[in-house]
Image (cartoon, grey):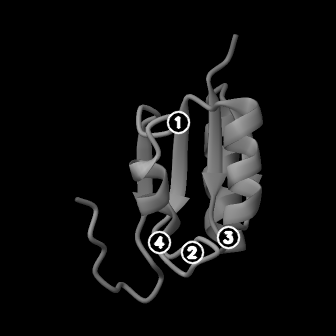
Amino acid sequence: MNKRVLIAEQADTVRAVAEAVLRQNGYDVIAVTAAEKAREVLELARPDLVIIGADLSAPDGSPYYERLRSDSRMAKIPMILIAPADKSPVDAG
């Protein structure tokens, strides 16, 4: 069984490139553009890795990656942050 990766990124180009590279290397990829869709995927598909845009916001406006880190069910899933396009600093903890 292939490893499953969730890509949650707003930028079409970044998401498409990451998805293409991962698929070419044998990963099953689920790509979404919004935090709400990412939440649905996380609950249903339980990916092995999450690649997430650092500028993706939760419904309350906070960074979505912070919400994932604070959720005990999701905190065990490895996460890679994609830096924001504006190069603003990211507090990755």
Q: Which residue is mark 2?
A: 57
Q: Residues within 10 Å of mark 3 (few under 14, many from 20)?
A: few
Q: Are marks 4 and 2 in contact (CB under 8 Å)?
A: yes
Chain-order first, disc 3 or disc 1: 3
Instruction: Residue type at mark 3: give it.
Output: Thr
Q: Are marks 1 and 4 in contact (CB under 8 Å)?
A: no
For the residues marked 4 and 2, what is the alpha-carbon distance in whole angstroms? 5 Å
Q: Residues within 10 Å of mark 2 (few under 14, many from 20)?
A: some
Chain-order first, disc 2 or disc 3: 3
Chain-order first, disc 1 or disc 2: 1
Outermost residue on the left side: it is: 93
Q: Measured along the vertical axis of the image, is residue 44 above or below residue 50?
A: above
Q: Which residue is mark 1?
A: 49
For the residues marked 3 and 1, what is the alpha-carbon distance in whole angstroms? 20 Å
Q: Are marks 3 and 4 in contact (CB under 8 Å)?
A: no
Q: Residues within 10 Å of mark 1 (few under 14, many from 20)?
A: some
Residue 71: x %, y % from top left: 47, 46
For the residues marked 1 and 2, what is the alpha-carbon distance in whole angstroms? 19 Å
